[in-house]
């Protein structure tokens, strides 16, 4: 029997991506196990979602730490205690230190609500609308020390309609996020997805361009 990959999910808020990954796990229990959900915010709804699924939770409140280094050190200790194979950032709104990202190089994924390299950082939906873009979307990437800058594995595009607001666009992106993230986590859990050097590899092929979810459907 192959052992299931052990996953920690880090959240800061609503946790709808966490929910999608939990539901995917429940539908395919042999694929992976979510062994820990950590939030830097005590009132994050993602913690409730985890508890409802009987997953161990931990709050590491960043406001209680003097600096990023001491917060990340505690985060790393809690993750390493659980001997995880993969860390999934799912709406985890903290900038991570270089040391932390290097410790988990090739073992940490992030989802970002834009078609990277466009719009790193915050307010991505608003910025895409204000720029007059016709398309927006999401990117899932390996985490490296560069903020939102690691090799992109998969993107999903959504159309921006003239009537779209920041809220309606965010909703469209969220729907695609919930399709995309479980799929990429599954690839990793099956050993199909790797980081080699500064490139993502899927099914033993180097991803010179990210997979486009729209092409898979
Ligand atoms: C998601 O849209 C995710 O892409 C974004 O936060 C949201 C979390 O939603 N992440 C970032 O902006 C990271 N830079 P959720 O809590 O409902 O999963």
Image (spheres, rainbow, N blue to C red):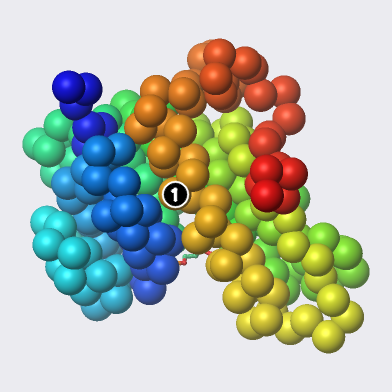
Whether residue 120 appears in this view of the structure is: no
Q: Residue at x 53, y 56 (%)?
A: 179
Q: Nearer the viewer, residue 50 or 167?
A: 50
Q: Locate residue 208: give its quadrant.
A: top right
Q: Residue at x 61, y 75 (%)?
A: 171
Q: Where's residue 205, x and y in %?
A: 62, 16
Q: Where's residue 193, x and y in %?
A: 48, 25
Q: Where's residue 83, x and y in %?
A: 15, 32
Seen in the picture, residue 121 relative to 34 is either above or below; the reply is: below
Whether residue 108 appears in this view of the structure is: yes
Seen in the picture, residue 83 relative to 169 is either above or below; the reply is: above
Q: Which residue is mark 1?
A: 182
- Picture mark count: 1
Lateral position of residue 46 relative to residue 98, left or right: left
Q: Residue at x 17, y 22 (%)?
A: 1
Secondary element at tag 1: helix
Q: Residues within 10 Å of mark 1 (few under 14, many from 20)?
A: many
Cβ of disc 1 within 8 Å of ligand 1? Answer: no
Lateral position of residue 78 relative to residue 105, left or right: left
Q: Where's residue 46, x and y in %?
A: 29, 69
Seen in the picture, residue 103 relative to 81 is either above or below; the reply is: above
Q: Residue at x 54, y 51 (%)?
A: 180
Q: Locate residue 97: give its quadrant.
A: top left
């Amino acid at each position: 029997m192959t052992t299931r990959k052990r996953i920690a999910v880090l959240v800061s808020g609503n946790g709808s991506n966490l929910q999608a990954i939990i539901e995917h796990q429940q539908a395919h229990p042999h694929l992976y196990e979510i062994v820990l959900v950590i939030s830097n915010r005590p009132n994050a709804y993602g913690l409730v979602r985890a508890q409802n699924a009987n997953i161990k939770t931990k709050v590491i409140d960043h406001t209680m730490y003097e600096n990023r280094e001491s917060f990340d050190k505690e985060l790393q200790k809690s993750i390493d205690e659980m001997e995880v194979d993969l860390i999934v950032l799912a709406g985890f709104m903290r900038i991570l230190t270089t040391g932390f990202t290097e410790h988990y190089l090739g073992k940490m994924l992030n989802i970002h609500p834009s078609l990277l390299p466009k719009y790193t950082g915050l307010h991505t939906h608003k910025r895409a609308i204000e720029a007059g873009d016709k398309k927006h979307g999401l990117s899932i990437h390996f985490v490296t020390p560069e903020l939102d800058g690691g090799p992109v594995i998969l993107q999903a595009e959504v159309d921006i309609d003239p009537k779209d607001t920041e809220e309606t666009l965010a909703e469209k992106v969220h729907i695609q996020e919930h399709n995309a993230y479980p799929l990429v986590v599954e690839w990793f859990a099956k050993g199909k997805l790797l980081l080699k050097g500064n490139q993502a590899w899927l099914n033993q092929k180097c991803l010179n361009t990210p997979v486009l979810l729209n092409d898979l459907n």
